[in-house]
Image (cartoon, rainbow, N blue to C red):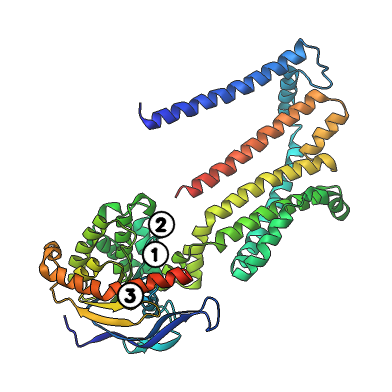
Amino acid sequence: MSAASQERRSKLASRAVQAGFLVALLALWYLGTTFWGISPLLLPNPVRVWAELKDVIATGEFLPDLKVTLSELAIAFAISSTSGITLGYLISRSPYLIRVFEPLVAGMYSVPIILFLPLYVLFFGLGPGSKIALGATISFFPIVLNTIAGFGYVEKIFVTAARSMGASDYQMFRYVLLPAAFPVILTGLRIGFTITLLAILGSETIASLAGLGHRIVHLAEAMETARMFAYIAFVVAIAATLNTITSSIERRAKRQ
Amino acid sequence: MTTGDVAVHVKDVSHEFGEPGDAFHVQALQKTTLDIRRGELLCLIGPSGCGKSTLLNMIGGLLLPSSGTVEVGHKAVRGPLPHDIAFVFQENALFPWCTVLENVKLGMVFQGVPKSEHDGRARKSLEAVGLKDFMGHYPAQLSGGMRQRAALARALSLETGILLMDEPFGALDEQTRMILGEDLSVLLSRTDKTIVFVTHSLGEAVFLADRVAVFSARPGYIKEIIEIDEPHPRKPGFVTTEKFAKLRNMLYGLLHEEIRKAVAQTAMTGPLT
């Protein structure tokens, strides 16, 4: 058997184990709620959750909340990626600035920024403003750090070679620095995107007027657990789709 | 080959890294004077840290001398001269995100060659180094020897009068560098380029060069210049001749003492690079 097919086979085997695990979990959930007397208030039956999910999608009830969450996500990510890449590039231009700011930014990244949410609510209100601010703040850090790493540590020989061939400043940026830094920046953007989504959903569950996170808390407070689970499944599907898209964009761009 | 004509004029050139008194102060090269003839292949050979690469970088304008002047075509060098001088570096100076063909073309973009000429010139130079069938490959898909061929093609496509090669085969295995050396000799016998070639290898120096400049240990100066009077292209059989052995032994004699000195220095101060 060739090494490639062997590898494919072992990959298939681990996929099967993963799928089996999920099926077992689902089965336990079903058995627990159908036969073992777990209260439907704590954990609703998966069949009911499925029915609720179909209803949520069929009625289009989710649309306004989805719109709010996605637009918060888009604005927050646009803010953090433009400001993060710009600032990261400027810092990367000088070894002195890198020495000063890289540890500083890395240190600030380790602060639990979610703690700023109450402050942001005071500043920007209960609406989308505070969610956007939080999402942008949280994702700003990995984007800046990766941009500094991408532009700041381009191998010297590439710059020297381009210089010896007469590259102008613009050509150096366009044909050397940018392509050298691009994969690293892309990783920062992917991480930034993922945690923006997390921050926005999380902050919507804490203090908000609308959005998918808000809806989930609202249903929990109304004890409509089955519908709440349906919304959670819906959000998980959305998040998984978005993350798959960003990862595949990253992979495709890095393949060269 | 016309020998009277001077392509590069190096006059009283010194170079030091850091200021005197600094912990890292190193006198890399001291008061070196050297005329490089138009059309010759000059090898610079010497122990590690003797300043031969430093001299090469100063000729190419990548580094400025601490004192003295370098003149190319009667003009003092104050920065890179992409229209007169092309470089081949030790390794991995190809852009990994570009294919071989794109790498060669990008050099011409930087140099300012009109776009209509890019394709023809790139293909011609890639053909000359034997990479016609690998134009669409990325550098990571090539062997070390092929990567250096591609780097050479990029330099050739720039059609400069002077080619500076900084240990271009230094990272390759013995057999690959032998073949590359033979091919280079054939290739270069067809051009009238002036070439300065830095190497560690005695055999490579004798095989390729018209003249070999032997450097002393740090602070480097040129100890002696040896003429290798053998027409290009050099036949592979040249290596087995008595003449080759004699010249190689002569170089060895000149270098041996300097290498000892350099090793002792390194043990005391650590390597320069």
Letter of the chain that mark 2 sits on in the rendering: B
What residue would you read off at disc 3?
Answer: B258
Letter of the chain that mark 3 sits on in the rendering: B
Looking at the picture, do discs 2 and 1 lie on one chain?
yes
Q: Which one is in front in this view, the residue at disc 3 or the one at disc 1?
A: 3
Type of the residue with mark 1:
Leu
Type of the residue with mark 2:
Cys
Q: Does A207 sit above or below residue A167? A: above
In the displayed structure image, the side of residue B243 where residue A67 appears, left or right: right
What residue would you read off at disc 2?
Answer: B98
What residue would you read off at disc 1?
Answer: B106
Q: Earlier along the polypeptide chain: callout 3 or callout 2?
A: 2
Callout 2: SS = loop
Mark 3 and mark 2: Cα distance apart in space: 41 Å
Asked whether disc 3 touches disc 2, contact meaning CB atoms under 8 Å apart, the reply is no
Q: Earlier along the polypeptide chain: callout 2 or callout 1?
A: 2
Callout 3: SS = helix
Q: Is the N terminus of chain B in the top left, top right, bottom left or bottom right quadrant?
A: bottom left
Residue lying farthest to the top in this orientation: A35
Q: Is the C terminus of chain B in the top left, top right, bottom left or bottom right quadrant?
A: bottom left
Looking at the picture, do discs 3 and 2 lie on one chain?
yes
Q: Does A71 sit above or below residue B170? A: above
